[in-house]
Amino acid sequence: MSTSPSLGSQLRQIAESLAREAGDMALRGRKSGPLTATTKSSPIDMVTQFDKASEAMITEGLATLRPDDSIIGEEGAAKKGTSSITWHIDPIDGTTNFYFDLPMWAVSIGAVDEHGPLAGAVYVPALGEMFSGARSEGATMNEVPISVRANHDIADALVCTGYSYLISEREVHAKRVANIVMKVRDLRRFGAAAVDLCFVASGRLDVYFEEHLNSWDLIAGQVIATEAGAIITDYVGNPVTPSQVLASTPGVHADFIRLIAASGPGTS
Ligand code: IPD
Ligand code: CA
Ligand code: CA
């Protein structure tokens, strides 16, 4: 007797296919013509025609495939649906990298139900890597199961972070990072939160932490990292929110919380 796929599995497939379609379109566009960029929250927070085109492609796809769901997208998509599902869309996460033609940018599409993040996909077109996951159904990269790195030693941890576009919000974090970099293996700043979360999920990083994100940066990567065995909380160990994210392999999570607390103000 065949059983039909779970809702999480169905939404994961939809997220994968829309992320791939939009990401490949943006990559082709990036390589073939001039970029039109304007700014948003600050002079360094950019949006290009491909951020908008990617979001339009994804929302049109959802209108056909999931017409009753709600949608929140970074470039303005906002729809109140009638089902229990809300999609959180970052049409290009890592727009600064996209603009500078660096490979670390992604399309991030996550679905939330009444219990929290349910399914998501993060597609990195320039690397040809599709990360996806669904609650209780594991996480994969290009269809191969992924899991976090086994590490219990904070001094051995490869750590990644990110900074807000608002310079005024960077000062506290910069001081904290200056202390943390003395206590860990090394530090990275790749420039795309959703990719950073997937890199924790796939064992390429031990820790990722950042403040002042939005739901579209977090949801898809949260499902993927959680399903790969990561622990995701805020900086003091409470349930994660976009405003404060600490994702790590379990063996260093408690030590990293202690390290953050010892490394500067603004953590509680
Ligand atoms: C940004 C990236 C970056 C992070 C910023 C985000 P965007 O998203 O994820 O790595 O440090 O906080 O806003 O603007 O490129 O979609
Ligand atoms: Ca983003
Ligand atoms: Ca974006």
Image (cartoon, grey):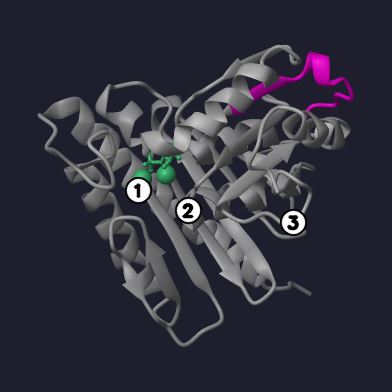
Say how many tags the image has.
3
> What distance separates the C-alpha of mark 2 from that of mark 3?
25 Å
Q: Residue under circle 3?
A: 137
Residue 75 % position (x, y): 29, 56
Q: Residue at x 45, y 77 (%)?
A: 69
Q: Give the residue furthest to the bottom.
A: 82
Q: Are marks 3 and 1 in contact (CB under 8 Å)?
A: no
Residue depth check, mark 2 versus mark 3: number of the one nearer the observer: 2
The answer to whether mark 1 is within 8 Å of ligand 3 is no
Q: Residue under circle 1?
A: 21
Determine if residue 5 is in view: no
- Work out which quarter of the rendered image holds the N terminus and state it: bottom right
> What segment carries the magenta color?
149-160
Label whose residue precedes the other's in the sequence (3 or 1): 1
Label whose residue precedes the other's in the sequence (2 or 3): 3
Q: Residue at x 63, y 27 (%)?
A: 176
| Magenta stretch: includes residue 155 | yes
Disc 2 crowd rating (10 Å Cα; few below 14, some 14-19, many 20+) is some
The answer to whether mark 2 is within 8 Å of ligand 2 is yes
Camera-nearest residue between 28 and 172: 172
Q: Residue under circle 2?
A: 214
Ligand 1 placement by image quarter = top left
Q: Give the amino acid type for the residue marked by disc 3 in the picture.
A: Glu
Q: Residue at x 79, y 37 (%)?
A: 257
